[in-house]
Image (cartoon, rainbow, N blue to C red):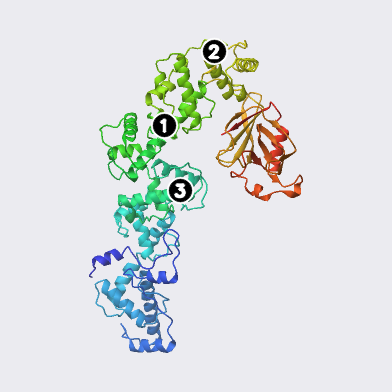
Amino acid sequence: MKYTIKTMAVLVALGLAVTGVNGFAESGAQQAADVSIAGQGVESSPETEASQEAAVQQAPQADTASSGEEASQTRTRMAEAQQHLIDLGYLYGAADGIYGPMTAAALKRFQGEHGLEETGELNDATIEVLSELAAKLGDVRALQQRLIDLGYLNGSADGAFGARSQAALKQFQAVHGLEATGLPDDETREVLFSDGAKSLPRRLRVGTKGDEVIALQEKLIQYGFLAAEADGSYGTRTSSAVTRFQKHLQAQGKAEGLGVEATGEATPVTLLVLYDPGYSSYLEDIRAGDEGSEVLRVERRLSGLGYMDAVPDEAFDEYAVSAAEAFRAAAGIQGSGYDRAFIDTLFSADAPVAEHFVMHAIAFGDEGTAVREVQEALVNGGMTVSMPDGAYGPGLAQGIGQLHEYLAEIGSPRAFLFEDENTLSVEAQQLLAGKLFSSLPVAFTASDTYMTSRIQRRLHTLYYLSKSKIDGSYGEKTRDAIIAFQKANHLPQSGFPDTMTLDRLFSSYAVYKVFPYRVEVSIDRQRVYVYESDESGEYTLTQTFTCSTGLGNSTPRGIFLDGGPCNVWHHFSKFDVWARYSYTIEGDIMFHSVLYSEKNTDSLRENSLYALGQKASHGCVRLSVKSARWIFEHCRPGSTVIVIY
């Protein structure tokens, strides 16, 4: 008996496909298209009794039946053959045992594809091949069921191995590094039925939330495709990052074989590749001076690991090279280039984290960790009261100016490093991070206005002294603040800033004054956070309020210690509006409720209510009536520190 190469393939790739790969349901039309392996599906329609009889009379028969019993046997044999043709994908419809034009055409096509004489008749040779192929259907069902169990195929295992089943098998083969033929050869079967066969994860898309999304986001961050925090919410940023990853797979030449398109939807195969411990994101070598998306990806990773402080961009400049070299040293990578070995190590899950970023010069307008560290050093050294926010602005420039003035006053040879308050060199930053302040004179005399101002600024940032008392004069308020500081830090309560007191005061481990309430206002988030302290001095977040701060920069930032309740109904004459439960922060800056046109609850200005959550006031912090009342009734004078940032 003759078998073509195609015949051997058909022995394992049989007939009609089950519904859809990866959850795409097939319509009747698609099912019809999947009937034939050759893609030429046959769809039979019910024939009338007259046409059926005519077809039987006119069509040639393998054996002419003269008796009713022989006719029944012939019809049974024809029905069995038709069922085989249906199972093998050559005929679509029901097996009725009637030999008509559609059956003849199906037989003829089957014979032609299997090296048989194309007669269209159901002869013994045709029956033999049909029966042999149909016997393989049990194996196909087992294969389909395994693909279904692993998530590559949806529907039921019906033994009809059509286009959808073949596509599912191709996808399985591509995922497992096998030749993607769509035919279950011995190697494919061995992997498919092994314990090492990989299951497809659940599809994720915009709107999905939860731990699965966090896992996805963390991987996208690891590979430099996402520059945001893993928050568990699949939004537009995550979708864009997934698109970047899918396009990266395309650039690597891996997407087509896996059936991955750049849709922004985390398909099962997309996730499987992303989570594969053996996946290499390497695309090309990187060189100093290069530009492009691969550079951005590398810089994001270096930044995430703490080697870079500057905002990642698409230029592999001198600073980026310095950061990359710092990573090379930490990871113990040999060589000098940024090749596959470097890239794979950089994006590995266990890449070493930097002990400190590579320092670089900073200037007015810069943002980042380097700026924040300078701000913190100046705050600890009593040179500024501006709260560290990582932005090089007027407050930091003023602090640098005050440091330069102080160093010049005491004759420090390093004063020149801080002469330009709008820029700081690496050397100046290293000095601030080192022992600059501990090396400065700590002897105090009441007439030393520079030292007194330093002391007062530091007492303020530790919540012991109001900002209005920073005047360079060592008076009663400053002395009381020193005593309170000494008590909290378990030092002798002399009221005098001796060496021991100053060493602790200008350190990063100085103890803050604890209030019953610490109220923080986040201008960026438009939220008010209330923390309550316990007996051990630990704060716990107990209240969160939505607010409206001032338009532009009209709400002052800083530390405020002199707040207190003002009026149940407060009239702002300048704007001729009323508010409830006003609470002074500083001067005419207050907490208060949403606005009213008159001194009654029926005159609510609804626009002020709807504006909560965004900047809207002239500088005050607006709250709902309930929230404003809570602060008014609980935060008594002297019980609260207010921090606005």
Left or right: residue 298 versus residue 399 is left
**Toward the viewer: 598 or 40?**
598
Most extreme residue toward the front is: 574
Residue kind at label 3, given as amino acid type: Thr
Q: CA distance from mark 1 to mark 3?
A: 32 Å
Residue at image coords 26%, 66%? 6
Bin the neighbour count of mark 1 within 10 Å (Cα to Cα): few under 14, some 14-19, many 20 and up. some
Q: Position of residue 312 (x, y in %)?
A: 39, 39
Residue receiving disc 1: 363
Placement of 533 over or under 500, stated as above or below: below
Residue kind at label 2, given as amino acid type: Asp
Q: Position of residue 230 (x, y in %)?
A: 48, 42
Residue receiving disc 3: 238
Left or right: residue 199 versus residue 338 is right
Of the two numbered discs 2 and 1 on the same chain, state the one appearing first in sequence: 1
Q: CA distance from mark 2 to mark 1?
A: 31 Å
Residues under numbered marks 3 and 2 in contact, where contact means CB atoms less than 8 Å apart = no
Residue kind at label 1, given as amino acid type: Ala
